[in-house]
Amino acid sequence: MRPLQRFERRLEGIVSGVFARAFKGDVEPIELAAALKREIDNTARILSRDRRLVPNHFTIELGPGDFERLNAYGRTLNHELSNELRDHADIQRYTFSGPIEIELTQQDDLPTGKFRVVSATVGTPQRRAPSYEQPYQQEPYVPPNDGQTVLQSAPVTPPPVPQPQRSGHPQVMLEVNGRRRPVNPPGVVLGRGTDADIQINDPGVSRRHAEIRLMPEGNGGIRVVLVDLGSTNGTLVNGRRASEQELVDGSTVRIGNTTMTLRLADEPMAQPPSSGW
């Protein structure tokens, strides 16, 4: 039985099957659970090799009819939806920015059967042990991100021994045949031409084939996006053709006959290699 089916049966049992008797077209709890999972998948941000930050505060906007029906079971529904999100986060190796909060609100502009999910990052990330590596899928909702930073004073200590400067976000690298090359903001162009940042000697690669863009974000995270630059033979990400695709640690990129793997490391490389492969 799939996780969402187990969630639906468990919730129906708690409220005496009331949702099984709902009219066709009403918003169902299983739809809310699926939308919340998509929301954190779509907004996950890389903190390090083993951590991705996701929002912890969710507002579910419902039409008057759906709100009246679902809000009657608000506490039970909130509890079950929160548990479902925690289970999903464990599988996907996500870190919530604080305790999970789910709020149902009524919006008169929404008809029965329609709803919106708005998420926000509230508080500071909760540390948790790393779980399992797994890529994410994303769909609709694109919410604002209201991150907050907590500052703490530190005791006076002697001046520290100077250390190499770090960017605050993980080091992004491309690996080909065991060789790694660092990728620094704002990114690099991959191609066969001499003007490419990383030159690839492969006849199946265009002169300016693709670009890897690095976009630092709040909380020390960084977003890595691959963009095909109108290449002749196209670009594959994890075996699928892509024109623009967000990358995570372990993502594979194939251009021409060359396959490379994106790697994230907490420490920068000591000596960058040459500009090509």
Image (cartoon, rainbow, N blue to C red):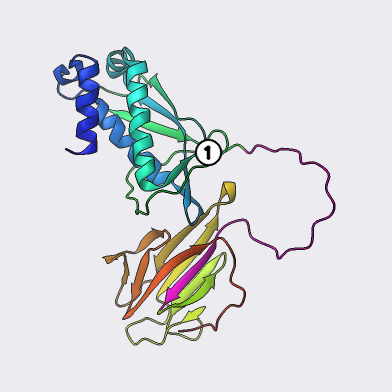
- Asked whether 163 falls inside the magenta stretch, the response is yes
Q: Amino acid at mark 1?
A: Gln
Residue drawn at 43 percent across, 78 percent down: 178
Check the image and report above or below for 10 versus 118.
above
Query: Disc 1 marks which residue?
Result: 126
**Does residue 181 appear in this view?**
yes
Check the image and report above or below for 190 versus 8.
below
Q: Residue 189 at x, y = what percent?
A: 48, 74
Q: Is residue 212 left or right of residue 164?
A: left
Task: Give, as a single range, the part of the protein colored magenta.
Answer: 149-176
- Asked whether 211 falls inside the magenta stretch, the response is no
Residue drawn at 35 percent across, 17 percent down: 74
**Does residue 141 appear in this view?**
no
Check the image and report above or below for 200 versus 138.
below
Check the image and report above or below for 162 versus 39.
below
Q: Residue 260 at x, y = what percent?
A: 39, 73
What is the tally of numbered marks visible in this picture? 1
In the rendered image, the quadrant that contains the N terminus is: top left
Residue drawn at 34 percent across, 64 percent down: 243
Q: Is residue 123 left or right of residue 208?
A: right
